[in-house]
Amino acid sequence: MKTLRRHLPVLLTLLVAMSAWAAADKTYRIAVIPKGATHEFWKSVHAGAIKAQRELAAQGVKVEIFWKGPLKEDDRDQQIQVVENFMTRRVDGIVLAPLDSQALVAPVVNATKVGIPVVIIDSDLKSDKQISFVATDNYQGGCLAAEHLARLLGGRGNVILLRYAVGSASTEQREAGFLDTLKKYPDLKLISADQYGGATRETAYQASQNLLNRYGRDVQGVFAPNETTTIGMTKALRDLGKGGGRVKMVGFDANAQSLADLKQNDIQGIVVQNPFRMGYEGTLAVIQHLQGRPVPKRIDTGVTLVTLENLEQPAIQALVHPPLDQYLN
Amino acid sequence: MVRGGKAGLVRVWNVFGPLLGLLFVVAVFSANPDVRPYFLTGANFKIILTQTVIVALCALGMTMIIVSGGIDLSVGSAVALTSVVGATAVLKGASPALAVVLTVATGGLLGLLNGAAIAGLNMLPFIVTLGMMGVARGSAKWLGGNQTVNYPDSPVNRLMALEAPDKLLPLPIGVWLAVALAVLMAVVMGQTVFGRHLFAIGANETAARLSGIRVRRCKLAVYALAGLFFGVGGLMQLSRLTQGDPTVAIGLELDVIAAVVIGGASLSGGSGSVAGSMIGALIMAVLRNGSNQSGWPTYMQEIIIGIVIILAVAVDRLRQRRTA
């Protein structure tokens, strides 16, 4: 007993030193859960998360990233399973792009119940348990598109909005931003805003053909709020000989096809998001929270207008061709 | 005496074969010291059990169908349609009990239609249920207006809710319900005349008919009963997503068939067991859970589950050759 009392301070110091050493050597294990794994959008998110990991490593903060999408892409139940499996794996934090604003609420609430902080990226969740929501300001994206279209048309002309789908929150916000901004230009007349392109390029192409069959002679400008409607509408305009800027076309979300259309001047502007930054900021946010530092409830990852004029600028190139090779593999 | 002993041994092996498989996959994931402290916990087994419920409930119906020599490809669509029916009922103000009854009854109705076409018109189950797969999926999208059906919070959501996610108990009601129904079905398949008739029909339909079994009536009952199980599966899916989703459970039928086959059933009919199918469903859930937690990429999971299915059937073949 006496010896123990004598050695107690030494033991205690040793213990404190050991725990301090352990804390310094702590590896944060973060699960980053996308909606699917094969789309380039999600690869950019992944690359952004890796960038955050490398920067933190340079500051001496060790982070291990588990990158894992649902086994079947776009399957809500499978994404719930992935969140649950990482919950019992006791990761330190989760960065999640929820496939559904309602269905993923319960697993996120459960994760926070056992003390795992969750940061939501890309699409919103109907919950107040998330540390932060890191995503595009879609309404702002729609405003940007309307202002660009007004500039292209000199403030006057007939305009069509081809909508994407009922119930898709992000594109509805873009459409609302577009329509609200359009009201600032009294000489821009909206001749159609009630048609939907749907989920695939084929359905969007058909809807565009039908729409242009009706309004093709009157229309001077078009806005399409996502990737499939942008590509479908551009193709339909080209078919009718309305490409090359005869009808001004503004789209949303860049990919190989829409960038080629931009270079051919069949599209005069594309509003793009920044998925790379979503992965980057999302990962940083969860680590900041774990280190006890405050994190803003909403982080805007920005929207940018890409045109033929600014396409070759390095900042724009980094947006439309994110440096995936540098971070993945 | 010797004969009885051998038959008993075969029966034991029928359940213990899949059970060994289950223990093997659990052992594989437990071998990794990084994963073990999280994988081998009550909380994790609660998650695994909860994730197994939907496949297990559907596998109860599918076991009956496969034992009787049939197949049902409309399971995933039936789960989607019944979940949308339930969600719509709750949204329109039906009481939780009524919503539950409507959901399960819709499944039974789909099964009855399948059974009527298969038994009444003597059509191939593969074709009939392939058609129903499209009909039910399309109807789900129609009823849901091409989007998910969201309703205000309802007691139905409690069926699959994880209370206390850091402990094994209490398990969600859905898990207990699946266990109870599995016990019930094991008794029905093993101890009742109806159960023996299913095995007889699956083994040799003509012989079964000639020996006085009412084959058509049996088949109708099998598909209708299985439909009820798919309806219960749809109810659990509804509770888990807290919404009716017309696009959910695409390809679920393959998971369910795989569970039944891993559990020792033969697709040519006449063999299979409820216990085996339940273990088959668990094996697949453990594989998914374990590979998530081990950080294996998604494509590895798909490859591994595919290999497990083929291995299970290969082992079954070897076993049959030895006992024949």
Image (tube, coloured by chain):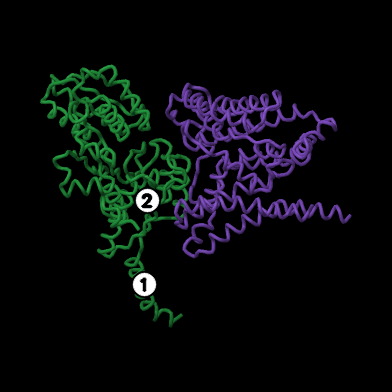
Q: Mark 2 points at which residue?
A: A32
**Sequence order check: which comes first, mark 1 or mark 2?**
1
Q: Which of B271 and B38 is in front in this view?
A: B271
Q: For the residues tagged 1 and 2, is the chain the same?
A: yes
- Residue B201 locus on image (x, y percent): 77, 35
Q: Name the residue under label 1.
A: A18
Task: Decide: is A123 above or below A321.
Answer: above
In the rendered image, is residue B321 in sight? yes
Q: Identify the subunit bearing mark 1.
A: A
Residue B113 in which image quadrant: top right
In the rendered image, is residue B173 in sight? no
Q: Which residue: 15% across, 20% down?
A: A157
- Mark 1, other Cα within 10 Å: few <14 / some 14–19 / many ≥20: few
Which-is-in-front pick, marks 1 and 2?
A: 2
Q: How many labels does the image show?
A: 2
- Residue A69 locus on image (x, y percent): 42, 47
Residue at the outermost right position: B1
Task: Decide: is A53 above or below A113.
Answer: below
The kind of residue on which mark 2 rests is Val
Q: Identify the subunit bearing mark 2.
A: A
Whole-number angstrom distance, CA of label 1 to CA of label 2? 30 Å
Q: Which of B91 and B57 is in front in this view?
A: B57
Q: Which residue: 58% across, 32% down?
A: B74
The kind of residue on which mark 1 rests is Met
Residue A94 lies left or right of residue B294; in this view the side is left
Task: Decide: is A190 above or below A167.
Answer: above
Residue B42 in which image quadrant: bottom right
Residue at the outermost left position: A154
- Helix, strand or loop at label 1? It is helix
Q: Colour of chain B?
A: purple
